[in-house]
Amino acid sequence: METSQKKYFVLRQHYEEFELKNELYNEIKAGRFRQGWGLRNLDLKQNKEDWIKNWMSEAKNEWGDETITPKKAEERYWILLPMLDIKQGDFIVEIGEAILQTDCETG
């Protein structure tokens, strides 16, 4: 008998606007789980070197951030890469900023 192992993925999101949270949740329900920053050319299926180059370029163009080094961009890549391992039936646990603040204050 084969049993499928369900995985749990814990994500932390910062939502400046409630509408963004709803938009991302609707994307997940529609099977289009993705990064939510709105930066272009960051498909995690492309090779790592292109992703790093694109991250650095887009962060500079969109946010004016010229402090991102290739090492920092690669760290971000490895943090995000497990998103590709999420399969139907896995659990996504989302932790919002308010929940983290509440948990810290109750101790």
Image: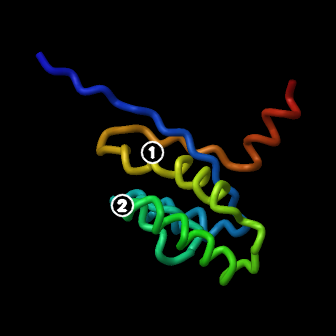
Residue 18 vs residue 36, the one in the foreground: 36
Q: Residue at x 49, y 39 (%)?
A: 9
Location of mark 1 (residue): 82
Extreme top residue here?
1
Extreme left residue here?
1
What type is the residue that disc 2 sits on? Lys
How far is the residue under mark 2 from the one under mark 1? 11 Å
Mark whose residue sits in front, 2 or 1: 2
Residue 28 vs residue 56, the one in the foreground: 56
Query: So how many labels did they put on this image?
Result: 2
Q: Which image quadrant for residue 85?
A: top left
Q: Residue at x 75, y 74 (%)?
A: 65
Would residue 65 appear left or right of 93 to someone viewing this image?
right
**Which circle marks residue 97 in the picture?**
none
Q: Are marks 2 and 1 in contact (CB under 8 Å)?
A: no
Residues packed near mark 1 inside 10 Å, few (<14), some (14 to 19) or many (20 plus): few
Vertical arrangement, residue 28 with respect to residue 54, above or below: above
Q: Looking at the picture, how far across and down is residue 13, in whole percent?
A: 64, 54
Q: Looking at the picture, how far across and down is residue 83, in whole percent?
A: 44, 49
Which badge, 2 or 1, comes first in the chain's sequence? 2
Q: Residue at x 55, y 39 (%)?
A: 10
What type is the residue that disc 1 sits on? Pro
Q: Residue at x 53, y 48 (%)?
A: 78
Location of mark 2 (residue): 45
